[in-house]
Amino acid sequence: MEEEKKRELCREMMTQDPRLARTILTYFEEEDFQRISDHKTGGGVIGGKACGFVLVEKMMETLLGEYADRWERCPSWFVGTEIFCQVRDGKTVETFRGEFERILNYFNGAPYIVRSSSLMEDGYDNAFFGKYESVFCSNQGTEEERIREMLNAVSRVYDSVKNQEAVEYRKKWHRKDQEEQMGLLIQKAAGTQIGSLYFPAAAGMGCSYNPYKWMEHINPEAGMLRLVAGLGTRAVTRTPGDYPRLVGLDCAQGNLWGTTGEKHKYSQRQVDVIDLDARKICTKNLSELLDIFPKSYRRLLLDRDTDAEELLARRGDYRKIYFADCQGLVEDRTFIRMMKTLLKKLEENYRQPVDIEFAVNASEDGWKVTLVQCRPLRSGISDQVKIPKDKDGEFLFDVRRTSMRRSKEQKLDYIVWVDPQAYYDYPYKKKPDVGHVIGKINHYLEETEEKALLLAPGRIGTSSPELGVPVSYADISSFGAICEVAYGKAGYRPELSYGSHMFQNLVEADVYYGAINENSKTRIYRPEMLSACPEVTERLAGETAAELLRIVKVYDVRGHAVLYLDAADGRAVCRLAESKKEKEES
């Protein structure tokens, strides 16, 4: 096919972004464009997410031929942006019922997922991590029930362009709402039917560059994986009480936890599956699934808590204690080597770091990977940073190996501190109000573009207020730095959500996202230093209940607070030196 014809097809069906088009045209031939055309409904382009998906499949096929028996294509259908534009202009999704019936027939009764694929998604400039809907469909029941399920899913995804997080994200990156158009990527759900449930052995996400070192000897250039048993929903969202398996691809079996008991404690307890009888995605306790796991799943997913087994045996209770940590996958050298090679090849061709999402199907014949998404990640050049020496008395905190994006020196205007004891004492049902106050402060920061550091107890963004402050990305999108702070008296423990959508949004925005622990990683933490600074909570938060002003406090640190990030040393320091005014007064 002539190059000009390929460029024309790329513009008409895929993208007008010259950077993405360059990579597509390097690998695509006539049959690749024809494959898309044969599985496409509606005019317009297929959108950013769909482009990344077809490109990663093509590059896997072309660049990693030695792993041809270890991956399989994901059956998919594409809906062009033209249908979204017509719906936005007043037509209903029902108008296109015939087109969607054709798509439904293609999946032939298999569960599938309707995913957004807007023009702005998964591009070089902005990724829109988790901003738009993805809807799993069981594809069960009568023909009318199944088409109604699909049309409802399509409507939900289209409507998600109006959700608050998406609106805030577009505002942050100065993208106009009228520019947004949405295609759809409809993919067969990876997995196997086991009884009335449907799910893959494992799923996860991978980054070609690991921006945060959770262990001293990790090489960021080697990349990372975040693995879970079951559907990949738990790999990209923050899940209270559950822990995915984090894998540094240069030291795959390196583990944060020293004992079997710790590995068990910080493992996955719940698994997301599609319940075909209930016709919806649901969460099952791992204990409910152990008896139905086929041997192929057990080999890849499960480990045993031999310490607990020994304790039980002393009491005459002889049984095996299993937990899910994807140990079998982590120990599989072929899997680790393939994922590491794939991520590096993608990074070379995209000319910047990338992340992917994938699922792992398993049978007695072995495992195979299905790739479902690929997108470039924003990356910044690290600055040379020199942390002041002999200034310990001026350090608010000094921490190591608790998350790092890149080296930089950033002046701070405000520090927002959530009093951990006051938050703990606040009534449980009212705790979300604390997140709303942070959201008000975030709105002020958005309007002024001033820089602030947030210090909050426990986990940021959790849905369980007993674990930390429940905020959405829209509540923290304008903060320049965010720290999860340990407070043992109340049981608050940081748990940085590496690889989740919130994590990726903070990485993309070049926000420092770290932890202040009660261990050797924290050399200094003195929140009492803040009391010497002017408190300006009411000015930034607006009208707020007095009881909340005792929990959330904003300190004006303009002119004498600096955040130092040294990526090479894995060190973060916040210096709170005396201001010129304070020096004169003293």
Image (tube, rainbow, N blue to C red):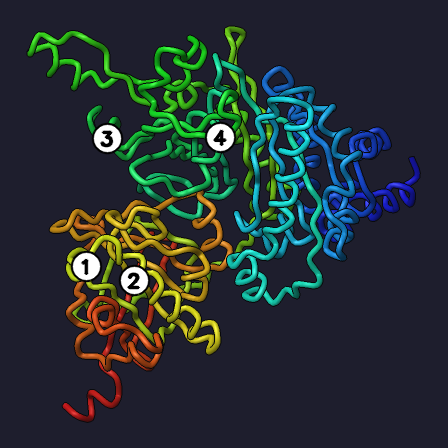
Q: Is residue 240 above or below residue 393?
A: above
Judged left or right of residue 351, residue 12 is right
The residue indicated by pointer 2 is 434
For label 4, the residue is 281
Q: Relative to residue 273, is residue 222 depicted above or below?
A: below
Tell me if label 1 and label 2 are in contact, CB under 8 Å. Answer: yes
Dot in front, 3 or 1: 1
Of residues 263 and 241, which is closer to you in this image?
Answer: 241
Answer with left or right where residue 563 lies relative to residue 422: right
Q: Earlier in the sequence, mark 1 or mark 4?
A: 4
Please, what is the three-letter code of the amino acid marked with disc 2? Val
Q: What residue type is disc 3 on?
A: Lys
Residue 516 in view = no
- Few, some or many residues within 10 Å of mark 3 (<14, 14–19, 20+): some
CA distance for labels 3 and 1? 28 Å
Q: Secondary structure at mark 1?
A: loop
User: Which comes sooner in the sequence, label 3 or label 4?
Assistant: 3
Does residue 504 appear in the picture of this structure?
yes
Q: Nearer the viewer, mark 3 or mark 4?
A: 4
- What residue is shown with label 3? 265
Q: Which residue: 16% across, 19% down?
A: 308
Nearer-N-terminus badge (4/2): 4
- Circle nearer the N terminus (2, 3): 3
Helix, strand or loop status at disc 2:
helix
Q: Earlier in the sequence, mark 1 or mark 2?
A: 1
Q: Residues within 10 Å of mark 1 (few under 14, many from 20)?
A: some
The amino acid type, in three-letter code, at marker 4 is Ile
Residue 401: image location, x then y, percent: 30, 48
Q: Which numbered disc covers residue 426?
A: 1
Front-most of 508 and 320?
320
Tell me which residue sits at (43%, 9%) in the image.
294
